[in-house]
Image: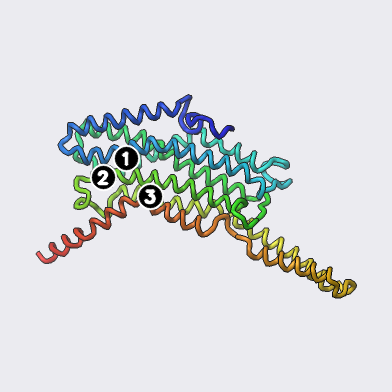
Amino acid sequence: MDASEDIGSTLLPGPIKMYFVWIVFSLLVGMSCAIAFYTPEPRPYLGLCLPIATGFLLIPYAFRFARRRFVEWAANVASFAQAVPSGATGPGQGADRWILSELSFFNGSPPMYGAGLCLAAWTLSAFYLGGYLSNLGVLQLSFFCILTTLSASLAGAGLYAIFCGARLIWRLGDGRYRILVRGHKFGILSTGRLLGEIYFVIACICMVYDLSAVLGERDLYADFNYWNPPLWMLVIPTAVLIVAAFIYCQVPLHRQMVAFKKSELTRVETRLDQIELDDEQGISSERQACIRFYEDRRKEILSLPEWPFGLTNIFGTIGSSITAGLPTVFTAIKAAPSFHFGAIRRFLE
């Protein structure tokens, strides 16, 4: 597959081009503004609709970015993943070609679109339980449901793609390939960097969606609710999914990396024992140099990483999960003083 192929063949059904997404986005924004103009309080309605419409536009770009990064990573994966004769993919198939074939999930599938519809229903339920729909008229409510269904369906497809990408990383380490461990960032450690970059982009888009739950309030601070359903039903599960998927999908690679270190360490120490027990060589300079070589090799093996990511990647992923809920966090901080003051005043009364 060519990494530059149009986004229409990597997410949207049929020959849909990106300019069509821009046309739909412009229509959604225009209709949001037009409908808000005839509402008593246009600001909350725009705050509810515009972030969701923006998310609809950003998700295809996120898909394109994720697919391009996977293709770039696949070009280098053969340097640390070697096919084994008993592998599930059959002997001789390189890891790079296998990964490219697995990226077909970006083309879209019935399960992906089903996940999108499920998230759309879940999102509408969250806004309903949060009371965002109670003050909307028939026209405003109908348009909001259509907008949310379109946008959340794409978001659900994105979450399904997270699952598929995590499953791909899991399968890479399930034993069909032998993992070689090197200390530089271009080897197995590139896996953690790949996932960290993709999950950060996803978290930024989730932050845009989170804005709708904040800006959709009639009063940004006075009406803030710490038990807001969109927060607990959408933001927090997404943040947990990002961290959990990042770590869990790399567990098989971690196990292989530990096994590689054990195997290499055993080989080196066995060789050292043989050299030290070989009395025929005496204490020649060649023997001493050989001992120093294997001792240095042992130190190098012990310093090799045991996870496909470094501290920067894991902290970045945690930061990404926090990024997804930043608007809610900032609103909570600003609302906290007035919340506590109001509680104290009610207590005194």
- The residue indicated by pointer 2 is 215
Above or below residue 232? Residue 38 is above
Residue name at image x 75 percent, y 66 percent: 294
Pinpoint residue 275: horizontal percent, then vertical percent.
82, 70
Tag 2 secondary structure: helix
Return the residue nearer the eye: 295 or 42: 295
Nearer the N terminus, badge 3 or badge 2?
2
Above or below residue 164? Residue 226 is below
Quadrant where the N terminus is found in the figure: top right
| Rendered image quadrant of residue 90 | top right
Tag 3 secondary structure: loop
Tag 1 secondary structure: helix
Marker disc for residue 324: 3
Q: How is the image coloured?
A: rainbow
Residue name at image x 21 percent, y 34 percent: 36
Badge 1 amino acid: Pro
Real-space CA distance between mark 3 and mark 1, rounded to the nearest whole angstrom = 13 Å
Residue name at image x 21 percent, y 40 percent: 43
Marker disc for residue 119: none
- Estimate how packed mark 3 is, as few (under 14), some (14 to 19) or many (20 or more) residues with alpha carbons within 10 Å: many
Residue that extends furthest to the right in the rendered view of this protein: 280
Q: Are marks 3 and 1 in contact (CB under 8 Å)?
A: no
Above or below residue 148? Residue 172 is below
Pinpoint residue 300: horizontal percent, then vertical percent.
67, 64
54 left or right, relative to 159: left
- The residue indicated by pointer 1 is 51
